[in-house]
Amino acid sequence: MPTNKQRREAERRHLERQLQNRRLREARRRKQTLIISIAMTIVLIAGIVVTVVALSSGSAKKPKKPAAGKKSPSATQSVTPSPTSTFAAKQTTGPCGYQTADASANPSLKDVGLPPDPKPTPTNDVVATFTTNRGVIEATLDGKDAPCNVQALAYLIDKKFYDNTPCPRVDDSSIFFVQCGSGGTDTAGGPTFTSPDENTAKADYSPGAIAMANTGAPHSGSSQFFFITKDSNSGLGKSYSLVGHVTKGLSILQQVSSGGNDGSSSAGGGAPKLALTFKTVRVTKVVGGAKDPGLGAKPTLGPVSQ
């Protein structure tokens, strides 16, 4: 029969075996947990890689967006396109070929009819007087080099299109100007016609020059124009019809331009901090011909030439 000492020794060895087995089981459990964790991590990483590759591939297959135009300032006017419009433009049959504009696509346009379009186009110089809230500005419009635009401007003046209207935009950075003539408080307005481009190749945007604003497309000028207040030849491309020069009141325009703006225009500049409003605009003199080249019979219309 085993002695007490032998029984205690047997119990001690049995307990050690149990502890050893427990340690082995715990070690195996930790090892299995580690293996499972590593496997899950690998699966997760693989999933992320696949997702990133898939997204990258999807992006590469998307059509490229057209390159955005330069964000440098430009003397443009706003437009409100209508993708569902079925408007069919027509044009006058005279030398200027004024084109009708779609008022349903831009509710800011005002229908004042069409300028006359006689043959030949009058080439008289026109003196215009702008009576403003800051004083009188006078300008000579060049009927020889920009006859169609001058004829259209004289027509709009006769219709009192510019009376009681603000100049909605100025800039005084890389180009320097006061933009007027929309007929409203922003640059979206104008009449329901557009004028052809003229006198651009030799355009000189020096202080006092007056040029027609446009949308960036050919034949898109209308009523809006800008007074150049400082030399802007390095900032402006020859894309704007030069129509005349300021002969009095340039200092008024320079004060408004340099007075700052609210930065609201994506094309550069914005609404002036020093407001300039036309009270009246009148043709006060016509040089070398008829009393007013902006008046005449209603022009006949034909389809736009393609």
Image (cartoon, rainbow, N blue to C red):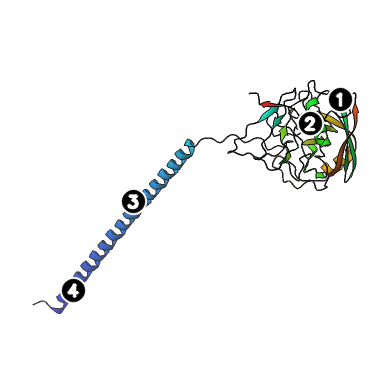
Q: Nearer the viewer, residue 274 or 78?
A: 78
Q: Nearer the viewer, residue 97 or 220?
A: 97
Could you tell me how far apart the alpha carbons at marks 3 and 1 are, in whole angstroms? 88 Å
Q: Amino acid at mark 3?
A: Ala
Q: Residues within 10 Å of mark 3 (few under 14, many from 20)?
A: few
Give x and y (percent) for residue 175. Answer: 77, 36
Q: Which residue is mark 1?
A: 124
Q: Which mark is residue 257?
A: none
Q: Which residue is mark 2?
A: 152
Task: Say which quarter of the image contains residue 306.
Answer: top right
Q: Nearer the viewer, residue 50 or 213?
A: 213
Please report whichever mark, 3 or 1, sits nearer to the chain's N-terminal start: 3
Please report whichever mark, 1 or 2, sits nearer to the chain's N-terminal start: 1
Give x and y (percent) for residue 240. Answer: 75, 30
Q: Amino acid at mark 4?
A: Glu
Q: Residues within 10 Å of mark 1 (few under 14, many from 20)?
A: many
Could you tell me how far apart the alpha carbons at marks 4 and 2 are, in whole angstroms? 117 Å
- 100 lies left or right of 139: left
Please report whichever mark, 3 or 2, sits nearer to the chain's N-terminal start: 3
Q: Residue at x 80, y 37 (%)?
A: 176
Secondary element at tag 1: loop
Q: Which residue is mark 3?
A: 39
